[in-house]
Image: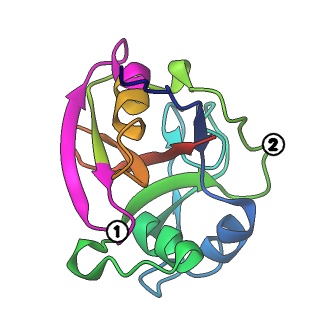
Amino acid sequence: MTTTTTPALAVRPIDPAVLAALRERDDAGRPPVPAGNEDGGAPLRCCLTRARPGEAILLTGYAPLRRWAAETGADPGPYDETGPVFVHAGPCPGAGEAWPAAFHGGERVLRAYDRRGHILRGVPVTPDTAEAAATELLADPEVAVVHVRALHFGCFLHEVRRA
C-alpha cells in the first residue's frame, strides 16, 4: 500500500528585506515608479491584499524565480524572468502563510518548478480550486516551488512552498 502525505502550504509574499531593496531599485536595475491609485484595487505583493483608494503604492520589476534561486542555489537559466508587481511605497504589515482567498478574484495559473528552477508544468485554476491544486502540485516530490500568476496578464502574485 502506498501512502502519500498532503503538504501544508506556506504562502509567501515578497520578503520584507527584498521589498526594501525593490523600493530603491528593481530587479531590472530601474527605480520603482509611483503608481496612480485613486480607485484602489491593485494587487499588492507585499501583503497579499488589494490597495485601498489613495494608498501610496509603487510599480516595480521583480524576478521571483531569481530570488528563490539565490536562496536555494538553483540556476533557472532561461526560466528567469522579471515582471511588474505592485507594492506599498513604505513598510506594511506583510501577510501570514495562510492562503489569501480574498486576494484571488480571477483565474490563475500555477507554475510548478523543480529544484533546478526549471518549469515542470502550469495548471490553470479558479479561486475555488487554486489552494487544492497548489497542495496537489507540492505533493509531487519533483516540485520545489509553485508560483501563482494571473492567468490573463501572467503577472506573479505570490509563491507557495511546503510549510
Residue 67 is inside the magenta segment: no
At 26% from the left and 67% from the top, the residue drawn is 118
Which kind of residue does numbered mark 1 sit on? Answer: Gly
Q: Is residue 126 magenta?
A: yes
The residues bearing labels 1 and 2 have C-alpha atoms spaced at a distance of 29 Å
Residue segment shown in magenta = 112-132
What is the quadrant of the C terminus in the image?
A: top right
Relative to 137, residue 61 above or below: below
Q: Residue at x 58, y 39 (%)?
A: 11
Q: Secondary structure at mark 1?
A: loop
Residue type indicated by callout 2: Pro
Using the image as rendered, state which of residue 107 and residue 3 is in the foreground. Answer: 3
User: On the picture, is 160 further left or further right than 2?
Assistant: right
Q: Nearer the viewer, residue 102 or 42?
A: 102
Nearest to N terminus: mark 1 or mark 2: 2
Residue drawn at the location 50% of the way across and 31% of the way down: 41
State the image coordinates of residue 67 (x, y, percent, origin top left): 52, 72
- Quadrant where the N terminus is found in the figure: top left
Q: What number is the disc on residue 93? A: 2
Q: Which residue is at the front of the view, 124 or 112? A: 112
51 horizontally vs 159: left or right? right
Q: Dot 1 corresponds to which residue?
A: 117
Q: Which mark is residue 134?
A: none
Q: Secondary structure at mark 2?
A: loop
Relative to 102, does residue 19 appear above or below in the rendering?
A: below
Residue 87, given in percent of the width and then of the height, sits at: 59, 53
Measured from the top left, where is residue 82 in percent x and y?
Answer: 35, 71
Tag in front: 1 or 2: 1
89 relative to 29, above or below: above
* Residue 144 seen by the camera: yes
Position of residue 86 relative to residue 4, above or below, is below
Query: Residue 2 location in percent, x, y?
Result: 36, 25
